[in-house]
Structures are given as structure tokens and as C-alpha cells.
Image (spheres, rainbow, N blue to C red):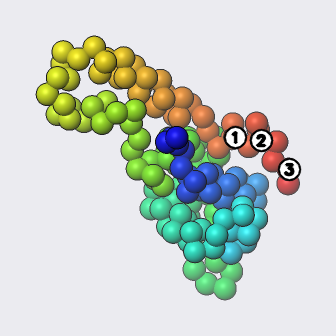
Amino acid sequence: MTEIIKKDTDYAMRMLAFLALNDGKSPVAAKKLAKDGEVPEDFAYKILRKLTRAGLAVGTMGSHGGFKLGKAPKDIALLEVVSAVQGDISVRKCCLAKDACPRQGICDISKVLGGLQNNLTGSLKRITLADILKEAQYKK
């Protein structure tokens, strides 16, 4: 089975959830995020770099450094997290790349898969970190 949401994206969402629960009070150390999110520490650092590059997290250096959310939970779409951590996802290559298939303009399958791609992308855009926190009933 091929997964759409990879393990590293799941880890990223866990760490973002813990940052959201911190309410921006003070930066959270990467070690703490890894431990609380049950993320391997080496992997946590790699994921946090990607989240920071995408503006979803903000890192500060120093003895009181760590990470905070880069945006409000309601403004962090699952699609942004997926894109930051995994890169763009597609149902089929022809759904994203205009010249991926010589039959693209005449292929009925491509039209159906394009609709599926739009539904997938639309759903990932609509689901936010705030929705996930609410649904998961994370407790402070």
C-alpha cells in the first residue's frame, strides 16, 4: 500500500500540535518536541528545518531558544505541511505536470484522475492544524 501522508508528515503534525498547545508562551526545545511527539530526535531536527523553511515554525537560537508556530493554527493547512515535508503530491504525474503524458488532452482517465487530484488538494487545503487539534481533542 502506498501512503499519501508519509510518516515524516505525521511527525511534523504532531510537533506542530505541541507548538500550538504551547500558545507561543516560550520557544519549545526540539528535544522536548521530539520526546512529547514520540519522534526520533534526529528526524525531529530534519523535519523542524523543513517546517522553518516553509514558515510554519520559527526557530530561535540560544539557551532559551527553541521553536514556536510560524502562523496561527487556523492558518496552517495540512497541504502546506505535506508540501513542506514531502513535496507536492499527486494522484498521477499527469495530474500535476502539463507535459507528463503525450495523451493528456485526449485521455479520459486523465480527466477522472484530475478530478480526484482536485478533490485531494482541496481537502488538504481545507483541513487546518486547528481542525486537527479540535478533532483530536488534544489536552493542555
Q: CA distance from mark 3 to mark 1?
A: 12 Å
Would you place residue 7 above or below residue 3 in this image? Answer: below
Q: CA distance from mark 2 to mark 1?
A: 6 Å
Choose between 109 and 135: the one closer to the eye. 109
Look at discs 3 and 2 and give the one toward the viewer.
Answer: 2
Q: Which mark is residue 139?
A: 3
Q: Residue at x 47, y 23 (%)?
A: 119
Mark 1 neighbour density, 10 Å: few (under 14) some (14–19) many (20 or more): some
Task: Report which residue position mark 2 lands on.
Answer: 136
Q: Residue 23: which quarter of the image?
A: bottom right
Task: Report which residue position mark 1 lands on.
Answer: 132
Apparent side of residue 4 relative to residue 13 in the rendered image (left or right)? left
Return the residue found at the far left: 102
Residue 59 visible in the displayed image: no
Would you place residue 124 above or below residue 66 in this image? Answer: above
Q: Which mark is residue 40?
A: none
Apparent side of residue 122 relative to residue 110 in the rendered image (left or right)? right
Residue type at tag 1: Ile
Give x and y (percent) for residue 66.
64, 73
Label 2 close to label 1 by CB (< 8 Å): yes
Residue 138 visible in the displayed image: yes
Could you say whether the residue bearing mark 2 is in a helix, strand or loop? helix
Q: Residue at x 41, y 27 (%)?
A: 117
Q: Residue at x 68, y 54 (%)?
A: 14
Q: Residue at x 40, y 50 (%)?
A: 87
Apparent side of residue 111 relative to residue 34 in the rendered image (left or right)? left
